[in-house]
Amino acid sequence: MDGTYKAVATRDRGGKPIASRFVVVQALRSENPVLWDRYAGRREQVAVQLSSRGEDFPITPSTLSASLGLALRCLHEEHGNPSNEAYLLHGSNPTSALSILRTSFKMGLAGRNAGSMFGPGVYLAESSVKADEYAQDDTNGSYA
C-alpha cells in the first residue's frame, strides 16, 4: 500500500487527519465467473489492439504506477501487462464489503453513505489516501 500513498487531502476528507500509513490485514476476492470471462475476453482484445497499433500508454502518476506494479506481480508475472491493466481502490466498511461478497454489487446502494458527486456509480481511486476518505470502521476498528 505504500506505493499508492499520496498525502493529499481533499474536501471529501472533511478535515479528518490523514493516516501516515495503511496496512492490509486481510484481502478477499469476489468473482462472478460469467462477468470475469467477459472481462478477460475484452482485456485480450485491448491487448491485441494496443499491440497492433504499437502504442504505449505510460502511466505517469506514481500512485497508479504502484497499482500497476501490484497487478503485474499478482497477475502478469509471465506475460507482462499488455492491456495496461491496474488495480484501483474503493473505500467502504467491512460489513458492506462482506455483503458485496455475498450478494454482488447493488448499484441502488451506491453512494448511500458518502453521497455520489457525479451521479450513481462505483467510485474508485488510485490513491489509498483518497479511498480512505470514504472508508468507515466497524466496531473492531477495521476499515475496508
Image (spheres, grey):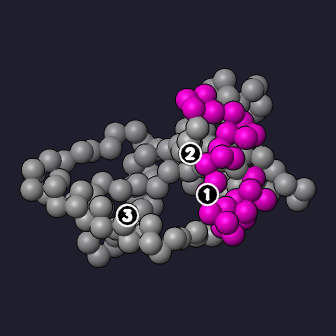
Q: Which residue appears at 50% of the width and 44% of the height?
A: 126
Please tell me in which quadrant of the rendered image residue 71 appears: bottom left
Where residue 135 appears, as percent x and y from the top left, is 72, 46
- Please, what is the three-letter code of the amino acid marked with disc 2? Val
- Please, what is the three-letter code of the amino acid marked with disc 3? Tyr
| Residues tagged 1 and 3 counted as in contact (Cβ below 8 A) | no
Badge 1 marks a residue whose secondary structure is: loop
Query: What quarter of the picture does the N terminus occupy?
Result: bottom right
Circle 1 sits on which residue? 105
> Earlier along the polypeptide chain: callout 1 or callout 2?
1
Q: Distance between the residues labelled 1 and 2?
A: 9 Å
- Give the number of the disc on residue 39: 3
> Earlier along the polypeptide chain: callout 2 or callout 3?
3
Looking at the image, residue 40 sits to the left or right of residue 79; the answer is right
> Earlier along the polypeptide chain: callout 1 or callout 3?
3
| Segment colored magenta | 93-119
Query: What quarter of the picture does the C terminus occupy?
Result: bottom right
Q: Tell me the crowding category of disc 3: few under 14, some 14 to 19, or many 20 or more residues within 10 angstroms, Cα based.
A: few
Badge 2 marks a residue whose secondary structure is: loop
| Residues tagged 1 and 2 counted as in contact (Cβ below 8 A) | yes
Looking at the image, residue 138 sits to the left or right of residue 129; the answer is right
Circle 2 sits on which residue? 122
Q: Distance between the residues labelled 1 and 3?
A: 16 Å
Q: Which residue appears at 24% of the width and 45% of the height?
A: 57
Q: Is residue 50 positioned above or below 110 on the image?
A: below
- Please, what is the three-letter code of the amino acid marked with disc 1? Phe
Please tell me in which quadrant of the rendered image residue 61 appears: top left
State yes or no: residue 80 in magenta.
Answer: no
Where residue 86 appears, as percent x and y from the top left, is 40, 54
Looking at this view, is 89 or 70 the one in front? 89
